[in-house]
Amino acid sequence: MVTGAFVEVAPPRPFDGIAATRPAPTRPALTRRLMRAAPPYLYLAPALILLVVWTYWPLAQTFHLSFHSWDLLPTSPLTSAGTANYERLLTTPALGRSVGRTFVVIAGMLPFTVVVPLVVGLLTRGVRGRTGAAYRGMVFAPMLIAPVAGAVAWMFLLDPGAGAVNAVLRTDVNWLNDTATAQWAIIVIAGWHLVGFAVLVVSAGLASIDPEYAAAARVDGASRGQITRWITLPLLSPTLAFLVLMTVLLSAQWTFPLIDTLTQGGPSGSTTTVYYLLWEYGFRSHDAGLTAAAGMLFFVGFMLPAAVLVRLADRTAREEGA
């Protein structure tokens, strides 16, 4: 008989046979986890191997050589020198002078690699079609000329007697053999060689900026100068940071073939930069240990500003992409 009272019913028990045969969850085996984690590293392996073989292994050998004396002859043994190479280098006045000239070269190259390309890129932003292609080809042409060939052409142009530069300026300056003008002549020639490449980099950066930003600003009444100042330049800052980074790190290398062809570090050492000083230690003095010590010091000296510039460029890119 049903009385209306509640009756407590026990929950059903699982079938003991199934519970006993179900496998307990276990963690993935070590081999399986390694196989899952390996693909990214396998993709990176070729690049990492090449980086070690071509960059870090020679760097390690240079560091080892910097503590030895060697005259570059295969039959001559390495002799331990301790820190003598570094001590000689840091007490040599030529090191300080070459570092100062390198800073002058970097500062002198910045207008050719950043300022002039930025101005030209902004002024020629509207050039399209065949005219734009012809313009880009003409601007890039100096980059296609071998540095030594360009140096020879400029040697004739800067000739103090029959050069076209003195004829135009109505002067008789001996541009490449005067301590006051030789380094600036090298900077101008290197700038002429690279300005077209920098213009193309700036033009590519300008082309990647969405034109809808400028269109929206015009709707709000912004002038062309305001659009350039507050929209174009901030969005172009990663490109400009890249050009500054290249100029700081590579200016001394860019000017090396010009110095070796036109002035050989002279007159009176006025065009000897750090790279040309390295070349003189290694292949004129045949002092491989001193050259290696100088190379290590310059590597550390360039690595620090490079790290700062790379960090600034990454931060700028993240802020602009946010």
Image (cartoon, grey):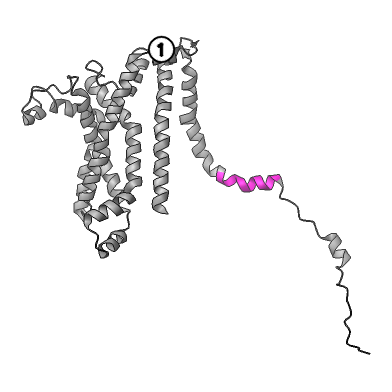
**Residue 33 lies in the magenta-colored region:** yes
**Residue 38 location in percent, x, y?**
60, 44
Say which quadrant the N terminus sits in: bottom right
Q: In which quarter of the image is residue 30?
A: top right
**Residue found farthest to the bottom:** 1
**Residue 13 lies in the magenta-colored region:** no
Is residue 298 depicted above or below 129 in this figure? above
**Residue 95 location in percent, x, y?**
34, 18
Disc 1 is placed on an element classified as: helix
Between 51 and 104, the one nearer to me in the picture: 104
Tell me the magenta residue range.
Answer: 30-40
In-image side of 16 versus 204 (left or right): right
Identified at 41% across, 15% down, the residue is 290
Identified at 24% across, 28% down, the residue is 148
Q: In which quarter of the image is residue 174?
A: top left
**Residue 175 location in percent, x, y?**
15, 23
Identified at 68% across, 48% down, the residue is 32
**Residue 185 location in percent, x, y?**
19, 27
Q: Mark 1 points at which residue?
A: 88
Residue 144 showing in the rendered view: no
In-image side of 179 versus 304 (left or right): left
Residue 222 showing in the rendered view: yes
